[in-house]
Image (tube, helix red, strand yellow):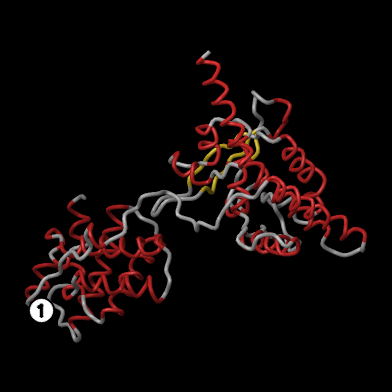
Amino acid sequence: MPGAELREASAQLVLLQGVSLLHPEDAVFEAMLEGWGRQQRGGRRLQPDTISDRQSAVRRFAEYTNAYPWQWSASDLDEWMTYLIAELKRAESTIRGYQGAIRMFCDYVTSPHYQWPSECETRFGVHPVQICHEWNTVAHLADYEGGPQRRPMTREEIQIFLDHADAQVDRAIRLGRKGALAAYRDATVFKLMYGWGTRCTETSRLDVTDFYRNSKAPELGNFGSLHVRYGKRTKGSPPRRRTTLSVMPWAVEAVEDYVINARPRYATAPEQSALWLTERGGRLQAREIEDRFAAYRDALGLDKSLVPHCLRHSHVTHQIEDGADPVFVQRQVGHRYASTTALYTGVSGDFMNTMMRKILDRALQGGQ
């Protein structure tokens, strides 16, 4: 880190040397958090939301221990983790996030470069120490840590779900009710999520101009590839972009029909770039997609654990079952690690038996 950034986050600068502190313990703790925020902004260029979340985790830990950072010990962390797991039932990924924040904060306040150890020794006669170690923190072993109940939808469930979504359009038209246009939009939203393996937020943020021609698939017209601009981001980084090639022609037909025949019916369509519009002229939000999915799922009596993200799981699983190269699928859906794609994949028993038969037949023929 450059010298200027070190000085900006140092204890003496944050505390404004020479100013008398009415409540020194509270003032020093707040100054530590402020200096840590400066360090993350200046040296690491992290997003404000990321910094705020980490500072909040440190504050929660301080409130639980009723102690200041220079008084913390590893046993304090152990007790907090027990409370979070046993009483609050926090997920493992949440636990690791809290531990990561505490570890990084301790790295900052124990570093001699920022002068907090000497500042605490002078004021309180004790200095902060690192309380997060390999033996009392959770290791990050997998990129995806969704609940074990999260699974792909079967092909039958996909068909039933999409048929039900289409039926809502016919029903609204037949009964002469408002909402036929929204129902048509929502049915197309779900087809896109399954057809291209997109997440809710990615889908919500799509614009009409995010579709492109693919010279290798001219039969798909202007919908040969999809540019996803708001992919899932890692902590402190901007959204990851990717281009997903269109591989389900029926889904292309559905989206093309929506863009040509349904979307222009929205009054604000000429002024809006959003692919999915609302009757009030805004952009369809991820929460609205989740709510409509839940309504259709419950109406059909499907598994309550199914959520819109399961459409993405289904895309990955069914592509691999249909013979797509796993590396191709990994790049299509924007997974950084092959292990994540593997965790998304829940191939059916029929597929496994087919693969087993092929392997056995090849082995038997080779032995003849």
Up-down relation of residue 71 to residue 290 (above or below)? below
Q: Secondary structure at mark 1?
A: helix
Camera-nearest residue between 141 and 209: 141
The residue drawn where x is 6% and y is 75% is 122
Q: Is residue 122 left or right of residue 192?
A: left
Q: Residue furthest front?
A: 368
| Residue at image location 12% in from the left, 73% down from the top | 120
- Residue 364 sits above or below residue 338 on the image: above
Residue 362 in the figure: left or right of residue 196: left
Q: Nearer the viewer, residue 191 or 110?
A: 191
Dot 1, how many residues are within 10 Å of its Cα: few (below 14), some (14-19), or many (20+)?
Answer: few
Residue 173 on image: x %, y %: 90, 58
User: In the displayed structure, does residue 235 sit left or right of residue 194?
Assistant: left
Type of amino acid under label 1: Phe
Residue 325, percent from left and from top: 54, 30
Q: Could you tell me residue 351's position as x and y percent?
A: 61, 36
Q: Residue under label 1, please give it.
A: 124
Spot the residue most to the top. 368
Residue 194: name its quadrant.
top right
Q: On the picture, is 293 further left or further right than 353?
A: right
Question: Which of these two is toward me, 294 or 342?
Answer: 342
Tell me what residue is drawn at x 11 percent, y 67 percent.
117
